[in-house]
Structures are given as C-alpha cells and as structure tokens.
Image: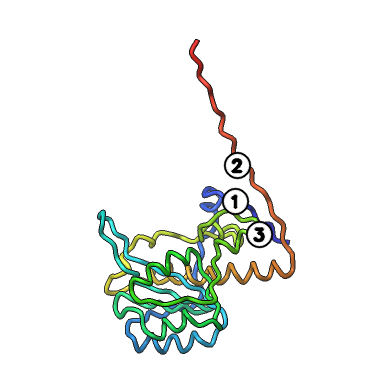
Amino acid sequence: MIVIKNKISKEEINEMPKVEYQGQSFVIDTPQQADNAVKYLSQFPLLGIDSETRPSFKKGSNHKVALLQIATDDRCYLFRLCKFGMTLSLIRLLENPSITKVGLSLKDDFLMLHQRAPFEPHSIIELQEYVRVFGIKDMSLQKIYANLFGAKISKAQQLSNWEADTLTIPQREYASIDAWACLKIYRLLEELRETGDFEIQTVEEPIEETINIQDE
C-alpha cells in the first residue's frame, strides 16, 4: 500500500536523497541526428517530454526554447533547438496521435515551442491535471516526484545557460531527469489507478492566528 499525501513540504523534500538519472542521455546537435532520434523514439507508445529555455535576467528580453527533452524509460534525447530549430520529424512526433506524450505544464511548453514552428500536439497527458485524481494538490514536478518516490529532484541547473556551446554533464542529467520523471510518475499512477493499492493522507495546513487590534 502506497501512501500519497495531498501536499508535501519543502522541509520534507530537503531531507530526501537526491535523484540520480540511471539512463542514457544523447545530445542532438543536427537535423540529421534529430531525424534518427525521432525514428527510434517513434517505436514507443509512451514518452516523457519537457523543455528548457535560457533564462532572461533583463526586463523585456526573452529567448526561444533552447532544448526539447524526449525520454523513454531508459533513454533521453536532448534536442538542441537553439542550434537547428524544430525539424519536420519532431513536429510529426508531437502531432502523432498514436504516441502518448506525458509532461508537466505542457501548455506553457507548447506556447514557447510555437515560437519556433506551428504544430498541433495530439495524445497529451498533462500531469498537473492527472494527479488531481489522486488528491495531490502540489503542482511542481519536484513535489509530485518526492511525494511518490521519496527522492529530491535537484533544481540547481534550472537557471543555467541552455544555449551554451556545449551542455555540461550536470545540465544533461538535470534535463534528462525532468522528462524521465514525468514518464515515471505517470507509469506509477496508472498502476495505482488500476490496482487501487494506495491511500490518500490529508496534510492539514497550519492555521494562522489573526490578532484583532481594537481601539480602546
């Protein structure tokens, strides 16, 4: 029996061991590499997806999506869109109704990806909506993963330069974990939905005392 909390605190997460990606990651730098990677990924009926954008620290300055991550259970392909843009093969993969794509905050990801090319995504699972069925109120990937697996996804690389000439090993691991974790979360929740082998633990939020000051 798995106990799922409706909410989990940052303090609890900070006490958990760090998630380490055990799969393989492949950096895709050219359109030809992208086509070959999509050909491989198209064999799978279920994929995890995520994206990364170079952070902007100046008001009014924005960047396009730099990286699109697409993961299987043991591989993650890191498509460097900042180098070659959206290929036709990637568009067809996102539009393929026979392949289910799982992610978190996908609406935002797709809005950003549309700045690179128009497409109509199909067969999408949005985890922020899916977890509500299980009573989970937290919406961040880090909190959802920690709740279900008791491990912490580090966010240390989140604001790094995703348009750098070469991605560092920590960047590759971070990006791979984000897409892979979406897939792992969905697989577990699907299993629990079928078996019913879970219970919801409601964590009560602390009640803040209100002090009324009246004029004498």
Label 1: element kind = loop
Whether residue 73 can be seen here? no
Mark sitting on residue 105: none
> Do tag 1 and tag 3 residues touch (Cβ < 8 Å)?
no
Assign a secondary structure to mark 2: loop
Please identify the quadrant where the N terminus is shown: bottom right
Image position of 136 with respect to 67: above or below: above
Mark 3 vs mark 2, CA separation in Å:
18 Å
Which residue is under mark 1?
Answer: 7
Looking at marks 2 and 1 on the same chain, the residue that comes earlier in the sequence is marked by: 1
Residue at 33% over, 81% down: 29
User: Are dots 2 and 1 in contact, CB under 8 Å?
Assistant: yes
Q: Nearer the viewer, residue 144 or 102?
A: 102
The residue to which callout 2 is attached is 205
Q: Is residue 117 left or right of residue 187?
A: left
Q: Amino acid at mark 2?
A: Glu
Q: What percent of the width, then of the height, locates residue 62?
A: 29, 62
Q: Mark 1, mark 3: which one is toward the viewer?
A: 3
> Counting other residues with Cα less than 10 Å from the Cα at mark 3, is it few (<14), some (14-19), or many (20 or more)?
some
From the top left corner, tell me how far across and down residue 201 is, in percent. 68, 51
Q: Which residue is mark 3?
A: 134
The Cα atoms of the two marked residues, 1 and 3, are separated by: 11 Å
* N-term-proximal mark, 1 vs 3: 1
Horizontal side of 164 relative to 43 (left or right) equals: left
